[in-house]
Image (tube, rainbow, N blue to C red):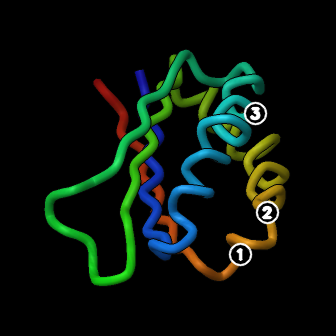
């Protein structure tokens, strides 16, 4: 199993709109690619975020490294480009890959 983690720090004034978009649009689109078996989504509350920001974490579960590579090569660029303009430049994303051996 492989976990693909995406940590997003986003301006507090748009955090709720972004959260709704993630839950109702982006995450379902990522899962529809077929490369992941499931996901977890939540807000990071400890350590506290810097003033004026909220921090969220999405964990996507892939069956193996090949599935994750296929997602990253075939679908991730398109889905990253689909971010609505109101969020552009107002967030920072960090991504990790965790391989369970």
Disc 2 versus disc 1: distance between alpha carbons? 7 Å
The 10 Å Cα crowd at callout 3, few under 14, some 14 to 19, many 20 or more, is: some
Vertical order, 90 against 23 (above or below): below
Is residue 58 placed above or below 63 in the rendered structure?
below
Residue in view at x 47 percent, y 57 percent: 95
Specify few, some or many for label 1: CA neighbours under 10 Å numbering under 14, 14-19, or 20 or more.
few
What label sits on residue 88 in the rendered view? 1
Task: Verify CB contact (< 8 Å) between mark 3 and mark 1.
Answer: no
| Residue indicated by mark 2 | 84
Q: Secondary structure at mark 1?
A: loop
Q: Which is more toward the observer, 12 or 28?
A: 12
CB within 8 Å, label 2 to label 1: yes
Q: Residues within 10 Å of mark 2 (few under 14, many from 20)?
A: few
- Mark 3 lies on a secondary structure that is helix
Q: Quadrant of residue 52?
A: bottom left
**On screen, residue 101 above or below 30:** above
Tell me residue 47's x, y (percent).
15, 64
Residue at x 72% of width, y 19% of height: 34
- Label total for image: 3
């Amino acid at each position: 199993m492989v976990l693909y983690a995406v940590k997003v720090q986003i301006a507090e004034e748009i955090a709720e709109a972004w959260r709704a978009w993630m839950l109702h649009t982006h995450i379902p689109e990522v899962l529809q690619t077929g490369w992941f078996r499931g996901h977890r989504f939540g807000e990071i509350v400890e350590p506290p975020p810097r003033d004026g920001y909220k921090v969220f974490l999405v964990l996507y579960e892939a069956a193996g490294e090949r599935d994750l590579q296929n997602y990253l090569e075939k679908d991730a660029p398109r889905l990253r480009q689909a971010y609505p303009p109101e969020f552009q430049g107002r967030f920072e994303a960090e991504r990790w890959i965790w391989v369970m051996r």
